[in-house]
Amino acid sequence: MSSGLRGSTPLNEEGPAAPMTPLRNTTEKEVRNYPEQPPVIPHTTQGYQIDMNGNKCLSCHARARTAESQAPMVSITHFMDRDGQFLASVSPRRFFCTECHVPQNVVKPPVDNDFIDIDTMLSKAAPGGRR
Amino acid sequence: MWGFVVELWDVLRRPSSVFGLGVLVFAGFVAGVVFWGGFNTALEVTNTEKFCTGCHEMRDNVFAELKPTIHFSNRSGVRASCPDCHVPHNWTDKIARKMQASKEVWGHLFGTINTREKFVDHRLELALHEWARFKANDSLECRNCHSAESMDITKQSPRASVAHQRFLFTGEKTCIDCHKGIAHHLPDMRGIPGWQ
């Protein structure tokens, strides 16, 4: 049995390394598969520093920077603390962007994916389709 | 000792009785060339990456941070070394910077940033110096390699293309305003304009 990622290499051997895949670098928003999905990053983020000293993502996506950058502001959910109270700036629990948001590679998925998005789910849920 | 000095001064004051004027002028000219060449060579040696990374403060901190960045390793292999960004290319500004560098010699001798903790404490101050320099000279060292006229925005990503047209070509911003942290790690960015 071979998995898509590993290819046909037997388990006791090391197969050839796959070539590096190109990164997608656009500005277009992707459709989210369900409302709470953290939107994917359409542009490259190589070398972006996100640590205690600073957050490169917020240099465009922070509220105060959006006029200059025209980038989408971090969603209001990022300002909420664990009790649902809104803070003045990004909550520490949402500070590290790449914990949830990822850039995209332009590649054919090597493994089959049977994920069903929310629209398909809703159309299946009740007879007659969407509520 | 003092007698020797007085004797030497007498010799230097009196006109030459052995060599002709032309010989002296020509010899002076040659000696000037040799001196200038030597001085310039020594100066250019201090302008190499090998020299800069000779100190562990630089090698273990900022040079190590440079290595994963695009200015060190990239598709085309065209790279920037320490003096390309940190030492002005034109002679007068270069000499001015070299004179300022005596402060760095002092720092090295007296260990101003010779541990990681001391370096991290000073990082913001050092970064502010460099950013101020880039702002003051309109990112001149960036423009040593990256020409705004030659920049083909059709080859850039949509984000970069828009940003360069809106801010760089109009002169509203200079390279360093957005591209902080392109080469080395950032210091504590609280309070820095344009950064949340």
Image (cartoon, coloured by chain):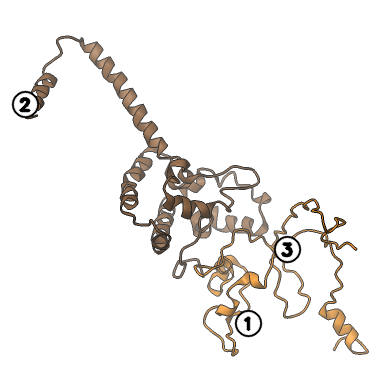
Chain where mark 2 sits? B
> Does residue B107 lie above or below A94 as drawn?
above
Q: Position of residue B101 (x, y in %)?
A: 34, 47
Residue A123, visible in the rendered structure: yes
Q: CA distance from mark 1 to mark 2?
A: 86 Å
Q: Residue at x 61, y 74 (%)?
A: A73
| Residue B102 located left or right of residue B185 | left
Q: Which mark is residue A77?
A: 1
Q: What kind of element bears circle 1?
A: helix
Q: Position of residue B134 (x, y in %)?
A: 44, 53
Q: Residue at x 14, y 21 (%)?
A: B12
Dots 1 and 2 on the same chain: no
| Residue B159 located left or right of residue B105 | right
| Residue B143 located left or right of residue A22 | left
Amino acid type, residue under disc 2 in the picture: Gly
Which quadrant of the figure has residue A32?
bottom right
* Colour chosen for chain B: brown
Dots 3 and 2 on the same chain: no
* Colour chosen for chain A: orange
Q: What kind of element bears circle 2?
A: helix
Q: CA distance from mark 1 to mark 3?
A: 23 Å
Q: Position of residue B196 (x, y in %)?
A: 51, 70
Residue B174, visible in the rendered structure: no
Which quadrant of the figure has residue B20?
top left
Q: Which mark is residue A104?
A: 3
Label 2 packing within 10 angstroms: few (<14), some (14-19), many (20+):
few
Kindly indicate whether the residue at mark 2 contacts the one at mark 3 (C-beta within 8 angstroms): no
Label 3 packing within 10 angstroms: few (<14), some (14-19), many (20+):
some
Q: Residue at x 33, y 23 (%)?
A: B33
> Does residue B11 lie above or below B48 as drawn?
above
Kindly indicate whether the residue at mark 3 contacts the one at mark 1 (C-beta within 8 angstroms): no
